[in-house]
Image (spheres, rainbow, N blue to C red):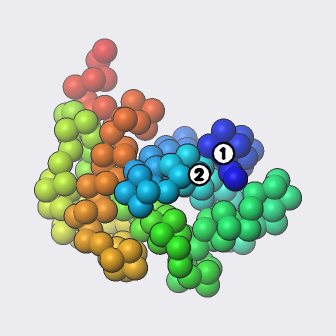
Amino acid sequence: MLTLERAEELAAQTITSPHLVIHCTNVMAAMGAMADHFGEDREHWMAVGYLHDYDYDLYPEEHLQHTAEPLREAGVSEEDIRAILSHGYSICTDVEPLTNMEKSLFTVDELTGIIEACARMRPNGITDLEVKSFMKKFKDKRFAAKCDRPLILKGCEMLGMEVRDVAQICIEGMKPYAARIGLLGTEHTAE
């Protein structure tokens, strides 16, 4: 089974841009919280979340087309490779999310982008972000406009959950990583 340490080793070979490292960390944290919600293996889900954009820095125009074979050669299981490929469903792959892990990854990939943008605007970052504040920003289509809201809604529907509930889980999952993902807020930058 893929460990977080191994996922970080593999990701370090191809993911180099600071923004993408933060994004992968956001997704990792959210996936850990989703694993807790579903009673699954937290570290395993975090590892898959961290590794999900394995080829993006190298092949942004061919995302997920250069993922399966290198990860297979590195000993990553077919189950985990499939989960990673499924997050691009209907965008750049035809691998439909079927398991809770796959559906969660598909959903939180975009969702964490809006959470991060919302937290960056707050004096205390994500540390005191509440879901009601997130929902106001989620409903404003001009805010974090590049984040695909219809895709997030589709993912939540697949999970049989409301956006508010998935966002709550992800926000709480991301809070312990606030310093690592640069979301402590402006109040903490002078320290």
Where residue 47 appears, as percent x and y from the top left, is 60, 49
Q: Position of residue 3 (x, y in %)?
A: 66, 45
Label 2, secondary structure: give it.
helix
**Residue projecting furthest to the front:** 39
Q: Which residue occupies the foreground of this view, 30 or 179?
A: 30
Image quadrant where residue 66 sits: bottom right
Label 1 neighbour load within 10 Å: few <14, some 14-19, many 20+: some
Task: Please tell me whether mark 1 sits on a helix, a strand or a loop.
Answer: loop
Q: Image point 29% across, 17% down: which residue? A: 190
Residue at x-position 19% and y-position 34%: 123
Q: Quadrant of residue 18?
A: top right
User: Which residue in the rendered view is the most extreme toward the top?
Assistant: 191
Give the amino acid at mark 2: His
State the image coordinates of residue 165 (x, y, percent, origin top left): 25, 63
Above/below status of 79 relative to 116: below
Query: On the rendered structure, is 96 left or right of 188?
Result: right
**Residue 18 can be seen, yes or no:** yes
For residue 150, say whether it is visible. no
Vertical placement of 87 versus 49: above or below?
below
Q: Residue type at mark 1? A: Thr
**What is the spatial separation of the Cα atoms under label 1 and label 2, in whole angstroms?**
6 Å
Residue at 22% over, 64% down: 164
Above or below, comparing residue 80 to residue 176 in the picture: below
Could you tell whether 72 is left or right of 2 in the image? right
Residue that carries the numbered disc 2 in the rendered image = 44
Q: Position of residue 153 (x, y in %)?
A: 32, 76
**Above/below status of 170 relative to 13:** below
Q: Are marks 1 and 2 in contact (CB under 8 Å)?
A: yes
Residue 3 disc label: 1
- Residue at image x 53%, y 79%? 98
Instruction: Pick whichever, 28 or 146, lies toward us.
Output: 28
